[in-house]
Amino acid sequence: MQQRLKNRLGLWGWLGGGRYGLDRYAYSLHRLTGLGILAYFIMHIFVTGQRVGGPENWDSTMAAFGSPLFKVGEFLVVLAFAFHAINGIRLILVELGWLIGKPGVPSFPYSYSTLRHKPVFIIFMVFAAALMIIGGVDFYFVMK
């Protein structure tokens, strides 16, 4: 019978990258942003469902979401969407072998995909950061 090992790291073992590097952090952040987007989607369905109660119910619901705290939350949703979308595109292209190449026969001198993967990761994250900045400018300065 196989002995089960205890998870001594707990939640940090799931979230923390530790010795795994950027890929592990991107993996954890991708999961967290996915859960955040799902929570936003559920809340969005609930809020738009308030229109059934009439104009008074809708106006009171929208007034509750007009506080600065909710504005920060909406901006965090913009950041989550930007990261999750760009990282998802990166993951799809890497898994299909279009960005770092398909696996080959291991022959000396060995070529490591991580040497090709890191620059691709950095380029995509710079693009995600640019989208986040554009979203922030649009959110706070253009939407007035």
Image (cartoon, rainbow, N blue to C red):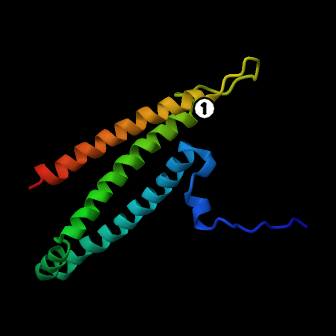
Residue drawn 31% across the image and 58% down it: 76
> Residue 82: x and y, percent?
34, 47
Above/below status of 103 relative to 41: above
> Residue 94: x and y, percent?
54, 34
Above/below status of 104 relative to 7: above
Q: Is disc 1 placed on a helix, strand or loop?
A: helix
Judging depth in this view, the residue of 78 and 15 nearest the camera is 15
Give the quadrant of residue 124.
top left
> Residue 6: x and y, percent?
74, 68
Residue drawn 56% across the image and 27% down it: 116
Judging depth in this view, the residue of 53 and 60 nearest the camera is 60
Q: Amino acid at mark 1?
A: Thr
Which residue position holds label 1? 114
Give the quadrant of residue 45.
bottom left
Horizontal side, residue 16 vs residue 83: left or right: right
Judging depth in this view, the residue of 81 and 48 nearest the camera is 81
